[in-house]
Image: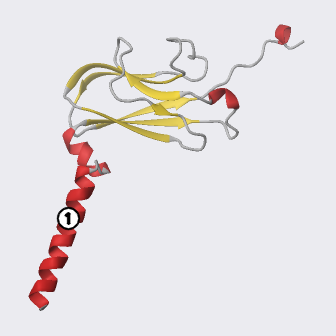
Amino acid sequence: MKTIAKILIALSALTISFTAHAKGGENSVSALAITYKVIVHMPAATPSVLRGVFVVITDETGRLVAPAQLLISGKTEYKFAESGPVKGIRVAKLSNGLRPHADSWISNEDMKAGLFQNGASYLFNLYISLPVPDKANID
């Protein structure tokens, strides 16, 4: 009876481990792909102008290299993955998706160039800086 219990426990542990890996657990992606971690530094009170804005990673031509992620108030860390290795440029930025380069006033763009290796992680920082209204347009 003890032997059967030990076998069942071992099978349960194996099943849980396999399921976490198959669902794309955090550690399963890092060994198989390039990972990009984007930290978004937001003001304490995120204004409504940031609704519908996405965090994106693109190549030098502006093509998405991983699916865009919706910017969420209070969430500062966004992770992306891409198969590689890849040589080129990667740019982290915020985008409203409507017009290219129309939202560069929302934050900086963080760019890295070189050879991006599988299993490696690359850090990008975005700093949100909202525009100061022009006094001539306030009236």
Q: Is residue 24 above or below residue 97?
A: below
Q: Is residue 127 above or below residue 3?
A: above
In the image, taking residue 134 as reference, residue 47 lies left or right, namely left
Identify which residue is drawn at 56% across, 27% down: 53
Could you say where residue 76 lies in the image, as x and y percent from the top left?
Answer: 52, 41
Residue type, label 1: Thr
Where the N terminus falls, by quadrant?
A: bottom left
Identify which residue is drawn at 28% across, 47% down: 24
Identify which residue is drawn at 54% across, 21% down: 96
Could you say where residue 55 lies in the image, as x and y percent from the top left?
Answer: 48, 29
Could you say where residue 20 lies in the image, as x and y percent from the top left?
Answer: 27, 56
Could you say where residue 102 lies in the image, as x and y percent from the top left?
Answer: 56, 12
> As drawn, which residue projects farthest toward the bottom?
1
Identify which residue is drawn at 39% across, 14% down: 62
Q: Which quadrant holds residue 113?
A: top left
Name the residue that disc number 1 marks. Answer: 15
> As drawn, which residue projects farthest toward the top?
136
Q: In front here: 98 or 44? A: 98
Q: Which quadrant holds residue 115?
A: top left
Q: In front here: 25 or 40? A: 25
